Amino acid sequence: MDEIETYLELHKNDEVHFSEIVNILKQYDKEKFSEAIQLIPKDILGDVALELPDRYFDNMVESLHVEDLTEAVKELESDDQVDFMQELKEHDEAIASEVFDNLDKRDQKEITLLESYAENEAGSYMQVEVFKATEDERVDEVIKRFSKLKKSHELENVHNLFITAKNSILLYSIDLDDLLTFDFSTTFSQNIEESEESFEPIVAVDTDNIKEVVNAFKEYDLFVMPVVTKDGKLIGRITSDDIHDIISEQATEQMYNLAGLKDDVEEDEEILKAGKQRASWLGINLLTAILASVIIGFFSDILDQIVALAILMPIVASMGGNAGTQTLTVVVRQLTLGDISSGDAKRIIFKEVSISLLNGLLFAIIIGVIASFWFDVNNLGYVIALSMLINLLLAGFFGATIPLFLEKMNVDPAIGSTVILTTVTDVVGFFSFLGLATIIL
């Protein structure tokens, strides 16, 4: 308790780092956490809460009154208000409803607007607080207005001034450093006419897919992007910190999906819920393992005759699985980041198969030599070498084609790819190795 009190005494609110407060809070047990969270000033409580892991957020809700939670929401920007309310609903819908009813009409309207968008639409990630002016306003008057808004903390993280027509149609986007070069005694339209720059904004329509917005941020190295309606009216902005959060969430989601998991379930504290989800994918994996075992059963006679095959068999499947996973990881990541698309299929498949061919030749020679010296079985080295080459080639091929095919079918390429690929490499590895052994040996 002393640590959080000392930190708050030493730092003014504008000097506070929310992550530092969170790191202190996470050191406490539930009882101390409950006491400490009540010491956090209400004007920063919401920001601190959004930095907390889910289980701590739940503890916070249980430790505070509805009035405290309402004050915390009021101090947040609109996009953060939505995030806070969504987490609150997951904890207790009744409390969330009570907090919402206690908010003023403007906050309620903004939250309702942002929640009306689909999860993949740009509008659901925007904040409605924008620094804007009309083209016929004088520069000095707008700067004075901005100064007041900044001092009252009504606007944060401002990088651009958006110039609109009187009907709210977005016309221009001006960086703050460019704004300093303007003649303050004249209007924006006069300054823009005299400037060599166009100030044409790069915009997102509120119904655009958020993936397109993320790609635009990266392509144009943006700090902020205005969000407009289909008829061009300015309704909000998306900032770089929002994009950073989106990329982080997508990376986490893809990582979980590759393992057949869901991030929201894994971050939940309910053991049975997480266990049930994992069990479903483990069940699928069990079926694929049985399929591979059935393939092995077809060659029981040759395995009984040559014990060395049983010893070497896992090597072929393991190498194929690892090679395929390498390819799969690279392709899924590039698809997620927008670096490639299903239209690049031929180039990607050729590249990955070529890499697999080179590695296949290298490791085929290595394992072939090892097997020849290890076991006194004629032609065994040739069998495992050829099988290794076949399996690595197919691992590279399917490691690239599976996610590309799923992407083309509008299915998340990370979901199910690993299970499908493991099945292919195991079945092909065992079948090629034991089949070749039956023919050659």
Image (cartoon, rainbow, N blue to C red):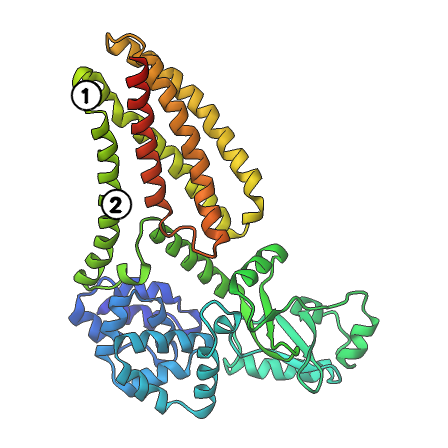
Query: On the rendered structure, is 302 left or right of 175?
Result: left
Residue at the spot 50% in from the left edge and 62% down from the top edge:
243
Q: Mark number for residue 301?
A: 1
Residue at the spot 40% in from the left edge and 26% down from the top edge:
390
Where, quadrant-wise, is the C terminus in this rendering?
top left
Indicate the secondary structure of the residue bearing disc 1: helix
Q: Is residue 333 visible?
A: no
Residue in front for this viewpoint, 36 or 282 = 282
- Mark 2 packing: few (<14 Cα in 10 Å), some, or many (20+)? some
Mark 1 or mark 2: whose residue is earlier in sequence: 2
Give the quadrant of residue 142: bottom right
Measured as percent of width and height from the top left, residue 149 is found at 56, 82
Residue at the spot 54% in from the left edge and 69% down from the top edge:
238
Measured as percent of width and height from the top left, residue 245 is found at 44, 62
Q: Mark number for residue 285?
A: 2
Residue in front for this viewpoint, 201 or 407 = 407
Outermost residue on the right side: it is 194
Give amino acid for label 1.
Asp
Measured as percent of width and height from the top left, residue 77 is found at 46, 77
Give the quadrant of residue 361: top left
Give amino acid for label 2.
Asn
Residue in front for this viewpoint, 168 or 196 = 168
Task: For marks 1 and 2, give the one nearer the viewer.
Answer: 1
Indicate the secondary structure of the residue bearing disc 2: helix
Q: Is residue 51 visible?
A: yes
